[in-house]
Amino acid sequence: AQKITQTQPGMFVQEKEAVTLDCTYDTSDQSYGLFWYKQPSSGEMIFLIYQGSYDEQNATEGRYSLNFQKARKSANLVISASQLGDSAMYFCAMRGGTGGSYIPTFGRGTSLIVHP
Amino acid sequence: DSGVTQTPKHLITATGQRVTLRCSPRSGDLSVYWYQQSLDQGLQFLIQYYNGEERAKGNILERFSAQQFPDLHSELNLSSLELGDSALYFCASSHRDYRSTDTQYFGPGTRLTVL
């Protein structure tokens, strides 16, 4: 079965600093996708970044980058130059071919607070 | 704005009642997924449809059912509601079928409160 682990329930960062949110995953599949979503206090789930298991380069989207270490099964999200609006819950997720289902699996999330 | 729409935004009802949540996927997306998010259970996958057909089932209760219509919008029906069904219900859509790792885009959610 697939599993996503986010070990940091809460993180604090100073505005303009960089922060890394940890995510480790467990799967026996060779082909899978890794995702990060942001959920602000308003409740919506916002897609941030995607990394495919066969992608050789780490994904980047603006201030977001994904530090993908396949051998360690980790997919950490790096937010550079944090802004107050980055305060939110962040969820790591994966989709893989376990049993052919590709059912998405989400971690429990990390709450990020950005201090001015 | 993800392009996925959900109605209603908020729903307050009583135990034992039945409600219907509605979702319209992004233009061009054929897959629709339903999730339940509660504080104690986190984000739980309920069910997926692709082009009108059920493709994958997660932790969906028998009291819950869903369908996807020919115009690709989907409805999630929750019946015999219990207090524990109070949660945020998300719909997400993606372009391809379940045997893919393509990105899901989430709607704004429907917050259900059962009193």
Image (cartoon, coloured by chain):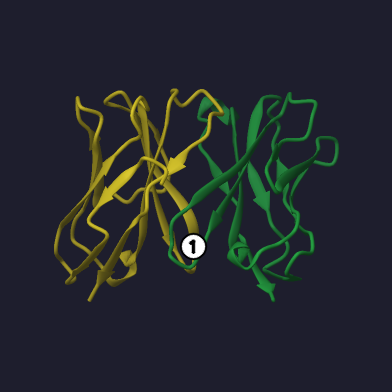
Q: Residues within 10 Å of mark 1 (few under 14, many from 20)?
A: few
Chain A shade: green
Which residue is nearer to you in this view: A6 or A49? A49
| Amino acid type at mark 1 | Gln
- Determine which residue is flagged by label 1: B41
Drawn side of residue B103 relative to residue B87, left or right: right
State which chain disc 1 sits on: B
Image point (69%, 76%), residue name: A116
Shown colour of chain B: yellow
Residue B74: x percent and y percent? 25, 38
Q: Is residue A69 left or right of residue A42?
A: right
Choose between B36 and A65: the one closer to the eye. Answer: A65
Residue plotted at (80% across, 26% down): A56
Residue B49 percent location from the top left of the image:
34, 31
Q: Position of residue A76 (x, y in %)?
A: 75, 49
Q: Residue at x 46, y 52 (%)?
A: B44
- Say if A15 sits above or below A104 in the image: below
Q: Can residue A77 be seen?
A: yes
Q: Quadrant of the C terminus of chain B?
A: bottom left
